[in-house]
Image (cartoon, rainbow, N blue to C red):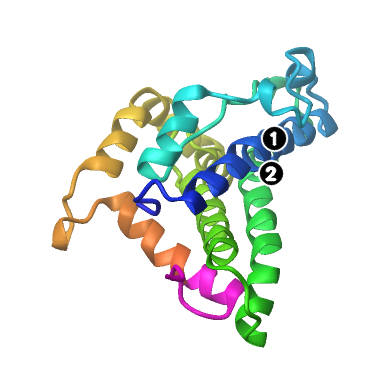
Amino acid sequence: MLLFNPTVEAFIAVAIIVLVAFPIHEFAHAMAAFQLGDSTARLFGRLTLDPRAHLDPMGAILLLVAGFGWAKPTPVNPYNLRGGRSGEAIVAFAGPASNLVLATAAAIPLRFIFASGMDVPAVVVNTLVILVSLNLLLMVFNLIPIPPLDGSKVLFALMNRQTEMRWRPVLEQYGFLILIAAVFLPILPGRETLVGAVVGQVLDPVYQLLVGQPRFLVR
């Protein structure tokens, strides 16, 4: 979706995502859960920023090849969390929120470079563009309200209890199949997928808000 040619910038950005962004995303889940009373992630050695604890080799490879990927999911026991469904939603939201923070951190120097006209090597600019884009992609994708994505936990917290009890078992049973269909089936005009449409409608406007101009790579 975003990457794709195997450029130097792409390899650098993916390495930073795998070694920094993925660990921070999963650590954010673990820390939020720990603060809300659940020590499961700590017991499994996941309350750490060590990338080795969070690495999923297939997710890392797909990040480079397809522009999206994943780390090992952080184990959380929702029954230990204070706040019930609200606590579960906070833990779920912590991961995507960390990606927004990382995207903003990468966007600050990029915005300054563009605004000042500073002469910076293209590899630096392109790496920052890809870092902002990938972190925003991870944020938006994870907030899609389809299990097992983080957004589903936020959705369930917003439902009344009766509605949640009716729909949560169904969505959790068939969520992965629904997600695969939403990612790969080109059912919208222009042969666009549902996930592609959602990401496109959110990612580019947020990118422009952070960076100050549309997304492009310097040649």
Query: What span is colored magenta in the figure?
Result: 205-219
Which residue position is annotated with label 1? 29
Instruction: Give residue 166's quadrant in the image.
Output: top left
28 relative to 4, above or below: above
Residue 102, percent across and down? 67, 54
In the rendered image, residue 140, in percent from the top left (x then y), is placed at 49, 53
> Which residue is at 61% across, 72% downward?
210
Task: Give, as a three-letter code, the residue at label 1.
Answer: His
Q: Is residue 180 above or below residue 138?
A: above
Q: Secondary structure at mark 1?
A: helix
Residue designated by label 2 = 94
Q: Are marks 1 and 2 in contact (CB under 8 Å)?
A: yes
Q: Nearer the viewer, residue 34 or 131?
A: 131
Horizontally, residue 184 falls left or right of residue 109, namely left
**Horizontal side, residue 30 vs residue 167: left or right:** right
Residue at image x 50%, y 44%? 11
Q: Amino acid at mark 2?
A: Ala
Instruction: Tell me if 92 is positioned left or right of 133 in this view.
Output: right
Q: Is residue 177 left or right of residue 22?
A: left
